[in-house]
């Protein structure tokens, strides 16, 4: 719909309409009155729009697509909507999200990988260009109310501090309301949250334990209720992006009970049963085969009894987490029904932003921070930790074998953009007023960049030429509306490239040519080979739905043509230069991106500063350093946190415990080292501090620490090993309060605010930095900390 009325919507924002009326000198002579100001509204009677995005869920996980995770909300929407069986993502979270909201390929909008791996190359710089406005921008400027809840992970890391800028935060991406987090994951029990641009602590319920997914849906329902109550004539756009079911897999024990013993059969038999169910549902054709199992991943029968016990429990926990998340979606649907707006709301339920995650390693883990820091967990420790599984004292992730099973029937996993295991995800579209053939399946091939143009066509809004005075790049996706009421309509998205960490592929008219360059759970070695050494595979997916039968040797000419097609698409969409680096790109100086801390060895912080991301404050790891605080203690002795970084699963804290100056170093939850002053501080003003001398000789080594009060050393101590790379994937540095899970056992997650006065805290990095050159082999797993 691009009639004359709509052409004025090509340049956004739309100018205010002039008020018409005779102007008198005296208000008492004013007849007739001015026309009332007209509120901006979209043309016609377009639907509300909701996008619900699940994190880290493979095609074969949900019950709506034949998987073992019971998801009744997904089934409810599918029964009254459409399931898309050939829908694709970008194989990683930040790229998929940027593509989803802009309607452009992820390299076209600077998101060739997660934000923390940004480089200076246009396709990888982590910056959404202002020539690519989001769907939220477009809808807001056309009269929609817009809000985002949950995980975003599209803000460049050097812009995530309280100093901004905020034009690439959600509030700058077109969302009038934002409640959630900017990173790749967060603790579901004790998250670090933002309301707009301001840090907030999760609400406390006296009768139940907090959970992030529940909070996000509460917030979404509350916002929609306000929209429909106060401005019923104004449509709304809500983007509900769960942190679930990304690790840590946090869920209360009652949700696990229905799955007890459910996965004792193992991942091999689970793949068989999932494929059979998928064929029954019709989401794969009857002739579909299981894709090959990758070398190096053990079959279930090869595991020891303890390995089976751990793996089954971790999968039970994941399935429960998925069921709990979907239950929150059902609560949202019930609320929409009660408000009378469900039938006129276009809902996209994306069951995954990439394939299932293989980042838990071959055995899985109950503390994901081990893998991020290159530390090998043991099966004995995992068994001992199973009673804590899913609760606040665990940070779990299932093993690779379950990731492969959750991607049934396809090959590979998250990060592997070459194969459908990394990119094919279930999509459900629900819109009773606009979809006449409910409960059907659509097999047309589509990609995440197709969601934005679909919304535009449904709402009758044109893609703008200019937004905020900036000429816009063309939308690169294809609307899916043509398929809503025509199962047999010829598909329109006929060519699509894929690339992630050098894994690459091309889809063209039913054929796929793919090459897997590196494997997520292998450490470094796959990235070392030349791209020219990569082996390309060829699949006719019109016949071979699951990429199970490689035809490269039989049809070399077809493969050659498709490889040329990949080069054309890659050049067009800013994919080059291909970049498979891992550890190097974590270093801003090497990667070539901006760095908030460039050249600084000291930072002074003040009371009330909180939720400072780890990459926006001085990096004390593998270095000698000092922390100095200017404080005042009250009569009767002080208590509480002076400065803290990290949380229960790794970090450090300087605080007062019953007046005694105390330093706690939390080594990944395995061991806590304490230094405690023998005498409490007297009331009044003091300079207190902690000094650490690093041993050197590599990363993660030990060192000597001391506490000082008014420049006098009061206690010395020894720390045998330190966290080498990452304290936390989500917890932050705070002054005067530990805002999330506690670093130290001395204080809890409530009532730990400092009772005195903090004038300032200074962190100084020593010049005797002993950090050796980065080791890609050790650093590989840290990359995934922000996904």
Image: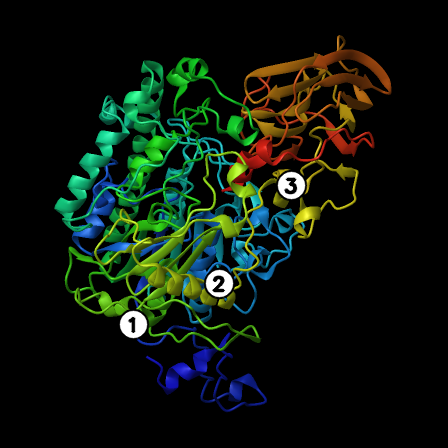
In front: 449, or 616? 449
Camera-side residue: 560 or 134?
560
Q: CA distance from mark 3 to mark 1?
A: 46 Å
Q: Under tag 3, what secondary structure?
A: helix
- Asked whether 185 or 530 is in front, the reply is 530
Q: Answer yes or no: is residue 368 visible.
A: yes
Disc 3 versus disc 2: nearer the observer = 2
Q: Residue 142, which numbered label?
A: none
Whole-percent x and y of residue 617?
69, 39
Give me the C-alpha separation between circle 3 and circle 2: 31 Å
Q: Who is closer to the viewer here, 18 or 622?
A: 622
Q: What residue lies at 31% left-to-right and 27% top-to-bottom? A: 299
- Total marks in image: 3
Location of mark 3 (residue): 615
Up-down: is 510 above or below 389?
below
Q: Nearer the viewer, mark 1 or mark 2?
A: 2
Q: Quadrant of residue 327?
A: top left
Q: Residue at x 15, y 46 (%)?
A: 279
The residue at which mark 2 appears reads as 570
* Residue 45 numbered tag: 1
Callout 2 environment at 10 Å: few (<14), some (14 to 19), or many (20+)?
many
Above or below: residue 601 compared with residue 555: above
Q: Which element type, helix, strand or loop, lies under badge 2?
A: helix
Q: Earlier in the sequence, mark 3 or mark 1?
A: 1
Could you say where residue 679 lies in the image, as x and y percent from the top left? Answer: 76, 9
**Real-space Cα separation, disc 1 to disc 2, in angstroms:** 39 Å
Residue 70 position (above or below residue 260): below
**Image: 716 above or below 560:** above
Q: Are discs 3 and 1 less than 8 Å apart at CB?
A: no
């Amino acid at each position: 719909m691009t009639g004359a009325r709509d052409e004025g919507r090509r340049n956004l924002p739309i100018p205010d309409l002039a008020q018409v009326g005779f102007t008198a000198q005296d208000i008492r002579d004013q007849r007739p009155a001015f026309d009332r100001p007209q509120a901006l509204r979209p043309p016609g009677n377009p639907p509300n729009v909701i996008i619900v995005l699940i994190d880290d869920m493979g095609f074969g996980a949900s019950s709506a697509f034949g998987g073992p995770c019971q998801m009744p909300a997904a089934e409810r929407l599918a029964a009254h909507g459409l399931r898309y069986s050939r829908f694709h993502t970008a194989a990683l979270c930040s790229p998929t999200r940027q593509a989803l909201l802009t309607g452009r390929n992820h390299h076209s909008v600077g998101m060739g990988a997660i934000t923390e791996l940004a480089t200076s190359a246009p396709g990888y710089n982590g910056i959404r260009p202002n020539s690519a406005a989001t769907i939220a921008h477009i809808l807001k400027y056309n009269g929609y109310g817009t809000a985002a809840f949950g995980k975003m992970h599209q803000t460049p890391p050097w812009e995530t501090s309280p100093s901004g800028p905020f034009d690439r935060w959600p509030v700058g991406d077109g969302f009038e309301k934002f409640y959630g987090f900017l990173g790749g994951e967060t603790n579901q029990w004790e998250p670090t949250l933002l309301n707009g641009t301001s840090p907030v602590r999760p609400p406390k319920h006296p009768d139940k334990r907090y959970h992030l997914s529940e909070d996000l849906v509460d917030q979404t329902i509350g916002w929609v209720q306000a929209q429909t109550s106060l401005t019923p004539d104004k449509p709304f756009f809500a983007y509900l992006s769960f942190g679930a079911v990304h690790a840590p897999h946090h869920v209360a024990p009652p949700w696990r009970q229905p799955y007890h013993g459910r996965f004792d059969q193992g991942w091999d038999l689970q793949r068989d049963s999932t494929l059979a169910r998928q064929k029954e549902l019709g989401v794969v054709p009857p002739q579909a085969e299981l894709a090959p199992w990758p070398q190096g991943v053990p079959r279930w029968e090869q595991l020891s009894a303890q390995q089976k016990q751990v793996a089954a429990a971790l999968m039970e926990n994941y399935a429960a987490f998925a069921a709990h998340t979907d239950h929150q979606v059902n609560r949202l649907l019930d609320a929409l029904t009660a408000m009378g707006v469900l039938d006129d709301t276009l809902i996209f339920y994306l069951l995954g932003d990439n394939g299932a995650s293989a980042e838990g390693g071959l055995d899985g883990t109950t503390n994901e921070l081990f893998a991020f820091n290159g530390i090998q967990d043991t099966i004995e420790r995992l068994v001992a930790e199973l009673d804590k599984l899913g609760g606040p004292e665990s940070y779990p992730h299932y093993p690779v074998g379950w990731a492969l099973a959750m991607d049934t029937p396809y090959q590979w996993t998250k990060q592997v953009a070459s194969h459908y295991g990394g990119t094919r995800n279930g999509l459900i579209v629900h819109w009773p007023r606009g979809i006449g053939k409910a409960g059907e399946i659509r097999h047309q091939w589509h990609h995440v960049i197709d969601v934005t143009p679909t919304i535009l066509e449904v709402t009758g809004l044109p893609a703008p030429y200019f937004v905020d005075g900036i000429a816009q790049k063309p939308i690169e996706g294809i609307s899916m509306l043509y398929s809503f009421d025509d199962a047999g309509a010829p598909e329109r998205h006929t060519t699509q490239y894929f690339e992630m960490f050098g894994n690459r592929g091309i889809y063209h008219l039913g054929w796929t040519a793919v090459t897997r360059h590196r494997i997520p759970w292998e450490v470094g070695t796959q990235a070392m080979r030349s791209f020219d050494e990569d082996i390309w595979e060829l699949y006719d997916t019109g016949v071979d739905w699951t990429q199970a039968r490689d035809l490269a040797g039989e049809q070399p000419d077809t493969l050659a043509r498709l490889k040329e097609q990949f080069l054309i698409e890659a050049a067009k969409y800013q994919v080059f230069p291909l970049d498979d680096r891992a550890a190097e790109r974590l270093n801003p100086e090497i990667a070539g991106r901006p760095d908030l801390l460039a050249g600084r060895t000291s930072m002074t912080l003040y009371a009330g500063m909180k939720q400072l991301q780890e990459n926006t404050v001085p990096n004390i790891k593998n270095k000698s350093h000092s922390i100095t605080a200017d404080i005042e203690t009250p009569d009767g002795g002080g208590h509480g946190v002076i400065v803290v970084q990290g949380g229960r699963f790794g970090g450090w804290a300087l605080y007062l415990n019953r007046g005694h100056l105390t330093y706690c170093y939390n080594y990944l939850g395995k061991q806590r080292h304490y230094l405690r002053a023998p005498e409490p501080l007297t009331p009044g003003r003091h300079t207190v501090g902690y000094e650490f001398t690093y041993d050197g000789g590599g990363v993660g080594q030990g060192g000597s620490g001391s506490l000082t009060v008014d420049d006098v050393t009061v206690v010395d101590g020894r720390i045998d090993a330190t966290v080498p790379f990452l304290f936390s994937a989500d917890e932050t540095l705070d002054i005067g309060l530990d805002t999330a899970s506690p670093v130290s056992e001395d204080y809890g997650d409530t009532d730990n605010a400092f009772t005195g006065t903090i004038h300032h805290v200074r962190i100084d990095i020593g010049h005797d930095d002993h950090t050796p050159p980065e080791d890609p082999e050790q650093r590989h797993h840290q990359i995934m900390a922000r996904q």
